[in-house]
Amino acid sequence: MFKGSIEYQTIVKAPRSEVWNFFQDSKALEELTDFPKVTVLSNGESKAGETVKIQIEAGPLKVNWLSAITDSKEEEFFVDKGKEIPFPLIKWKHTHSFQKLAEGELTGITDHVEFESYVPSVFIKAGLYNMFKDREKALQSQFKDN
């Protein structure tokens, strides 16, 4: 078993409230994630007590993922913990936090992931880094007209 963590920050030109509202719809994952392809199978907000079920598709492989939103503070953060997660992951905790920057004209979105896996953490970190890098482009495009 291997443990690891990664933190990635994206800055977008939009007020924190607008960015927070975008993230409240779990379907936003579909817009943000090109690879692996993500389909949200549940509805709900990113607030404590909700669950989010997604299907992840990488080529011919399809797996389901179920997370519970365990903690949330409006416009500041929410935390999802994996309940049913695919191999090679064992544990998953993802904290999404939102920071007001530059007099509210910019928002920092920080993703902090802690995980345990059956494979060395360097492989999980590399995949997560690439996913967050792609999401950064999608987020900046989403908020480019602000």
Image (cartoon, helix red, strand yellow):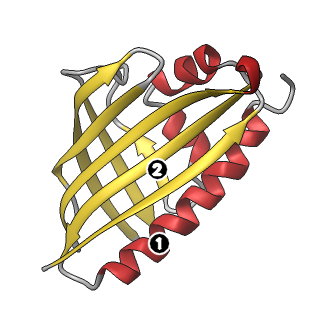
Reply above or below: 43 against 127.
Answer: above
The quarter of the rendered structure image containing the N terminus is bottom left
Q: Circle 2: is it few (<14), some (14-19), or many (20+) Cα within 10 Å?
A: many
The residue nearer to you, when weighing 83 against 91, is 91
Quarter of the figure with the C terminus: top right
Q: Are the residues tagged 1 and 2 within 8 Å (C-beta)?
A: no
Q: Secondary structure at mark 2?
A: strand
Precedes in sequence: disc 1 or disc 2: 2
Q: Residues within 10 Å of mark 1 (few under 14, many from 20)?
A: some
Q: Is residue 28 visible?
A: yes
Amino acid under disc 1: Gly
* Left or right placement of residue 73 versus residue 66 in this view: right
Q: Position of residue 89 (x, y in %)?
A: 22, 67
x 37%, y 74%: residue? 124
- Please tell me in which quadrant of the rendered image residue 61 appears: bottom left
User: Where is residue 112 drawn, in percent x and y?
Assistant: 40, 50
The residue lying furthest to the front in this view is: 103
The amino acid at mark 2 is Val
Say the numbered circle drawn on residue 127: 1
Image vertical order of residue 74 relative to residue 43, above or below: above
State the residue position of label 2: 38
Is 68 left or right of 130, judged from the image as shown? left
